[in-house]
Image (cartoon, grey):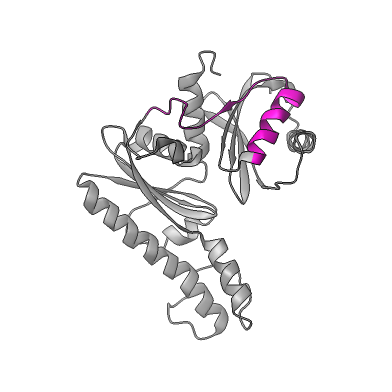
Amino acid sequence: MSAKKLLAVDIGNTNIILGIYAGEDMVASWRIATERWRTADEWGLALLGLLGMRSIAPGIVDAVVIGSVVPAVTQAWVEMCRKSLGMEPLSVSSAVDCGLIVLYDHPKDVGADRLANALAAYRRRGAAVILDFGTATTLDAVSAAGEYLGGAIMPGISISLDALYSKAARLSGVDLFAPLTSIGRNTGDSLRSGIIYGFAAQAEGMTQRFLREMGEETAVLATGGLAEPVCSQMCLAVEVDPFLTLEGLKAIYEMNCKDSV
């Protein structure tokens, strides 16, 4: 790898998704845990280790864009970029041009991940509803005119399960896959049914509400760790892309930095 690359970093409450882009192509990606206790130096060592595993020299990364919903980790990554990579990253917020007209009552309250998702979906499909299955499950809406309309925030699948397991002594964790029937005949399948089919029904019902309110031909896109198994059980046509947020962060970087890669 000799050409310069853009590193896009999506810092969520549970996981950090990283991707390196060469032009329009993603050439490497990683998913790691969001560990709030790590210092800038420790994040630097972690990043160097990830790059080394793919035989990628740190020097080829000449730009970084960060979208984060965890302020303490954001600051550590910004400091790491300065110390370990010798560059100032673009940290995405409502103060940065996101290429959309943000109609939220308080634009600064919209997370960087939601803005990135909305931009990526809008550029790809125009009017869209975007589901993101992360620590929280979010739905966002963008119009054909490029207006970020707002959205909904619900407890995510993982934290809902953590709460269930902590309060129900006879229930324990299960591998997540769709059971053969929605009527479970054992505790494991009953849990799987409630998780996969239940959250699919919730996501589908909320998406249908959005579609009725938007009143225009609208695409549905999804991202996040559990997007594939949940969306596969929805009756709607849903385009699943695990790297939708990174695609949006890349687009925001290119709009805001003249010397984009």
Q: Is residue 90 above or below residue 124?
A: above
Hey, which quadrant is residue 94 in on the image? top left
Which residue is the extreme one toward the top? 259
Is 123 situated left or right of 111 in this image? left
Residue for point 66% across, 34% down: 75
Find out whether residue 74 is within the magenta segment: yes
Outermost residue, left side: 215
Q: What residue occupies the far front of the structure in this picture?
A: 106
For the N terminus, the image quarter is top right
Question: Which image quarter holds the C terminus?
Answer: top right
Percent position (x, y) of residue 83? 76, 24
Q: Is residue 240 above or below residue 194?
A: above
Which residue is rendered at x = 79% and y = 34% of the image? 41
Give yes or no for residue 96 being in the magenta stretch: yes
Residue 106: x and y, percent?
A: 39, 38
Work out whether 183 lies above or below 36. Answer: below
Q: Residue at x 52, y 31 (%)?
A: 92
Q: Position of residue 182 (x, y in %)?
A: 42, 77
Which quarter of the picture shows residue 73?
top right
Image-quadrant location for residue 10: top right
Nearest the viewer among 32 and 151 is: 151
Farthest residue toward the bottom?
A: 185
Please provide percent x and percent y for residue 164. 56, 73
Q: Is any part of residue 167 visible from this angle? A: yes
Q: Is residue 123 above or below residue 170?
A: above
What is the number of callouts on the image?
A: 0
Residue 235 appears in the figure = no
Q: Give left or right: position of 42 versus 134.
A: right
Highlighted magenta segment, given as a residue range: 72-99
